[in-house]
Image: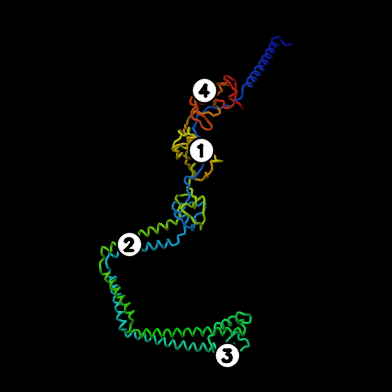
């Protein structure tokens, strides 16, 4: 049997066990009664103040290129998408005679400058000698007109004899050609079909009608050149052509005889016109020689300088007119649009091409209340859809005045976009980084509850809610800086604060 001591011990153990189970149950019930909350451990880190705006992407510089003069567009030398440099030829107008005008003006200028150089240098010995030689030759020619040399007479007689011999030879050739033609006609007429020849007549060469009849026969089916009749027709036409040639040669030879005889007769008996012409040539040669020997006068130099000035002006005008037929790129960029095609008549206002400079910028419109927070050179980030890494930019220009009605200010942000990811005409998200801190106490923006100008956070201390009033500083789109009221390591509640109260038991949500 159990002793009373053993029984007492057992009862004690049972009571202790029952109390332990009850305490554990109470602890579990208390823990289950605590509200689950999401918490964030306060830490230090970088934070920056941002202004976020949407803006329109546009080219840094864009221009509609128009021709420098009116006319017909001759060429468009670039296609859409082509990159050009400032000054590159991108189109041209029809220039017609302008290049020749430039060449003529330049030639006139060179001639005038050469004339001035010649005046300054004075007469050259070779020029004087040449002028004297020309004068001597002209005087000798005049003397020769009145008293020809024996050699000239002999040459003229030889020329006449040669021409006379040529007449005899050509007349003999003509007689032979006539006989051959008459023979060919007789052979053709011996057939029953003479294709229109003047059979029995010695009237040659053939008349045009007879020649045409023979040629027509050859083109007919019966006149095949391989047939007997065709061969006879070919023989007649060939002999007729040879006879006509012989007649022409004889006539030319007789003309040569007449010319040679006239030249022979003219030797020693010149006409008054020949003598007058030769004396005029002598006078011209004498004037030229005197001009070579006489130094220039002041009037000569003034005249040549005036000629040079006119030539320079004409050259400049011609070159300017020609230059205005070339359409050139006003700056480095890319051709984005082509408005007209060659053959179009254009004026100074006709758009030919659209040119956009390489590089883009983003134009944004700020609220006037944000404008004091920015300045030229302020850093910016431009988000690219589908990419984590934003582009880097800086504020390049702030409008000197805003829109009083809309209470806005226009701002231009220059963007470093070397790969061309931003396209003109699209929208971009811009964040202007107004202030940055490297080591600030920051909490998620969702942890703050604001009422007017006051801000509070709910913290969890030993499983209990503690409400703290805080002072905030910088803020971005995710976090807020707390300058007073929190320390690193504090647990702040970031969700469900509106249902909590001071001293409420809470537990971290799993």
Dot 4, crowdedness within 10 Å: few (<14), some or many (≥20)? some
Q: Which residue is mark 4?
A: 469
Asked whether the residues under the numbered discs 3 and 2 touch, taking CB atoms below 8 Å apart as contact, a structural biologist would say no
Mark 4 or 2: in front is 2
Q: CA distance from mark 4 to mark 2?
A: 95 Å
Q: How many labels were placed on the picture?
A: 4
Foreground mark, 1 or 3, reads 3
Residue at 40% over, 62% down: 101
Q: Are marks 3 and 4 in contact (CB under 8 Å)?
A: no
> Residue 378: percent from the left, percent from the top?
45, 37
In the picture provided, is 236 more to the left or to the right than 304?
A: right
**3D distance between C-alphas at marks 1 and 4:** 33 Å
Residue 427, percent from left and from top: 53, 41
Give whichever of discs 1 and 2 has the lower sequence position.
2
Q: Between residues 412 and 384, which one lies in front from this camera angle?
A: 412
N-terminal of the two: label 4 or label 2?
2
| Colour scheme of the rendered structure | rainbow
Label 1 crowd bin: few (<14), some (14–19), many (20+), radius 10 Å: many
Image coordinates of residue 307 in percent, x first then y, are 32, 62
Secondary structure type for disc 3: loop
- On the image, numbered disc 1 is attached to which residue? 430
Residue at 60%, 88% (x, y): give it. Answer: 189
Return the residue at label 2. Answer: 307
Closer mark to the observer between disc 1 and disc 2: 2
Residue linked to disc 3:
200
Q: Tell which tag, 1 or 4, sits nearer the viewer.
A: 1
Label 4 SS: strand
Q: 460 or 131, which lies in front?
A: 131
């Amino acid at each position: 049997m159990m002793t009373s001591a053993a029984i007492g011990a057992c009862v004690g153990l049972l009571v202790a066990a029952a109390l332990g189970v009850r305490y554990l149950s109470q602890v579990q019930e208390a823990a289950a009664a605590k509200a689950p909350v999401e918490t964030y451990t306060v830490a230090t880190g970088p934070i920056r103040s941002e202004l976020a705006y949407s803006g329109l992407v546009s080219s840094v510089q864009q221009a509609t290129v128009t021709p420098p003069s009116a006319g017909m567009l001759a060429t468009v030398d670039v296609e859409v998408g082509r990159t050009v440099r400032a000054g590159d030829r991108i189109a041209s107008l029809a220039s017609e005679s302008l290049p020749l005008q430039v060449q003529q003006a330049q030639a006139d200028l060179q001639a005038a400058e050469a004339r001035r150089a010649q005046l300054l240098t004075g007469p050259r010995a070779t020029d004087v000698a040449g002028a004297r030689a020309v004068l001597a030759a002209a005087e000798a020619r005049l003397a020769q007109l009145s008293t020809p040399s024996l050699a000239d007479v002999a040459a003229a007689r030889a020329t006449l004899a040669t021409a006379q011999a040529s007449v005899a030879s050509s007349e003999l050739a003509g007689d032979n050609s006539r006989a051959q033609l008459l023979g060919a006609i007789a052979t053709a007429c011996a057939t029953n079909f003479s294709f229109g020849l003047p059979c029995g007549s010695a009237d040659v060469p053939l008349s045009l009608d007879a020649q045409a009849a023979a040629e027509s026969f050859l083109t007919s089916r019966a006149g095949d050149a391989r047939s007997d009749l065709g061969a006879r027709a070919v023989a007649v036409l060939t002999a007729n052509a040879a006879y006509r040639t012989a007649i022409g040669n004889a006539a030319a030879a007789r003309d040569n005889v007449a010319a040679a005889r006239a030249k022979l007769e003219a030797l020693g008996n010149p006409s008054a016109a020949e003598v007058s012409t030769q004396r005029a040539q002598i006078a011209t040669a004498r004037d030229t020689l005197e001009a070579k020997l006489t130094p220039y006068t002041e009037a000569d130099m003034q005249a040549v300088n005036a000629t040079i000035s006119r030539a320079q002006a004409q050259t400049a005008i011609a070159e300017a007119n020609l230059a205005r037929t070339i359409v050139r790129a006003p700056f480095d960029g890319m051709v984005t649009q082509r408005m007209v095609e060659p053959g179009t008549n254009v004026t100074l206002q006709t758009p030919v091409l659209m040119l956009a400079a390489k590089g883009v910028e983003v134009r944004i419109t700020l609220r006037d209340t944000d404008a004091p927070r920015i300045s030229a050179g302020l850093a910016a980030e431009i988000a690219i859809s589908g990419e984590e890494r934003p582009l880097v930019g800086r504020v390049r220009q702030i409008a000197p005045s805003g829109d009083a009605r809309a209470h806005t200010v226009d701002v231009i942000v220059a963007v470093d976009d070397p790969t061309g990811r931003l396209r003109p005409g699209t929208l971009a998200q811009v964040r202007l980084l107004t202030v940055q801190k490297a080591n600030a106490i920051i909490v998620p923006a969702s942890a703050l509850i604001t009422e007017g100008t006051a801000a509070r956070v709910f913290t969890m201390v030993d499983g209990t809610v503690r409400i703290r009033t805080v002072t905030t500083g910088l803020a971005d789109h995710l976090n807020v800086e707390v300058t007073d009221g929190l320390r690193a390591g504090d647990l702040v509640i970031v969700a469900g604060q509106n249902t909590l109260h001071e001293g409420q038991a809470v537990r971290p949500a799993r």
